[in-house]
Amino acid sequence: MSARVEATVATLLAGVCSAVEAHHSVAYYGDELVELAGEIVEVDWRNPHVGITVEAVNDRGLSEVWRMEGNSIYNLRRQGVTAELFPVGQRVVVSGRASTREDNMMLMDTIVMPDGREFVLWDLSGRVDVEESVVDAAAENKGLFRVWSVPRANIGAYLQQLVDQPFTEAAIAGRAAWNPLDNFATRCEQEGMPRIMVNPHPFEFIDRGDTITLRTELYDIERTIHMNRSEAPADAAASKHGYSVGRWDGDDLVVTTTHVNWPYFDNRGTPQSENVRIVERFELSGDQARLNFTVTVTDPATFTSPAVLSGYWEALGETIPAYDCQPL
């Protein structure tokens, strides 16, 4: 790492590591927090990570151009952070984690403007600076069929569940084959079940009669839940998202998914077999403003007992824009 004018290095808080584990590029970056000052020369506002390029001057008086990565557009927008806040030519102070693979690459944590305003560009999970208001869902009376959002204050604990599961020794050993620098996420390929259901982007249920469409903004994915069958047909084709059959248990929606040929439980290389069976339960609150869910994953090749993921979403009145993932 070359020396820099206006640069300091500190130990990265341990909490940042767990927060970024859900994102594809963590393997590029080290465990030190770097701070530098410079001028914005380019802004690339896209998914999966926005990019900001800053020109700084090192201690030899030479110009250095730094490429910075931030979070996804949706996660930044929830924080009130938009591209317009970072005009080309603006002086800024940036802190983040330097790349271990490329010179002058950084995973941004914060940007501080000349007037003292600070914007969080990466670890949003524990920083709730903007209060999020639940809409009057009871008055709208849409029931399950609306856009649901992950409460930002709970994102860290939500994603941590992918790590805290009863994995078999074989599953843990299988992670050794995972290439953190070249995988489906770095190539902007859609993720499969059940991982796609544990992400901080919004979801939407759409009633189509005999089927329910379940959308997620992340990777522009649409799942089909078949409501007119009791089980998947024997000749159902396997796919990343499997074949889903739904039923109503009182007011709860219960969805069973089989025929999944997605080889990973998560996005750190934990393998799962094609025998995986996933049961989701969605329970609407009385005021229709909250949707509690439980995802139970059974796969003896991966878990010593069923894995259970749980949490809740809120009705925040959001929409689902196109994700339009563009690989770096």
Image (cartoon, grey):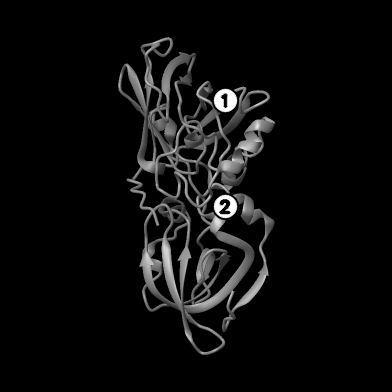
Circle 2 crowding by C-alpha within 10 Å: few under 14, some 14–19, many from 20: many
Farthest-out residue, left: 208
For the point 43% across and 9% down, the residue is 230
Q: Is residue 1 left or right of residue 274?
A: right
Is there any visible trace of residue 153 in the rendered image?
yes
x, y percent for residue 220: 35, 40
x, y percent for residue 90: 41, 77
Which amino acid type corresponds to the residue marked 1 in the rendered image? Val
Q: Secondary structure at mark 2?
A: helix
> Label 2 near label 1: C-beta < 8 Å?
no
Number of on-image labels: 2
> In the image, which disc is placed on residue 20?
2
For the point 38% across and 11% down, the residue is 229
Which amino acid type corresponds to the residue marked 2 in the rendered image? Val
- From what the image shows, is residue 214 above or below residue 127? above
Where is the N terminus found, in terms of image quarters? bottom right
Comes first in the chain, label 1 or label 2: 2
Circle 1 crowding by C-alpha within 10 Å: few under 14, some 14–19, many from 20: many
Q: CA distance from mark 1 to mark 2?
A: 23 Å
Nearer-the-camera pick, 256 or 212: 256
Nearer-the-camera pick, 12 or 328: 328
x, y percent for residue 95: 56, 69
- From what the image shows, is residue 56 above or below residue 74? below
Where is the C terminus found, in terms of image quarters? bottom left
Q: Which residue is mark 1?
A: 297
- From what the image shows, is residue 126 above or below residue 304? below
For the point 37% across and 13% down, the residue is 235
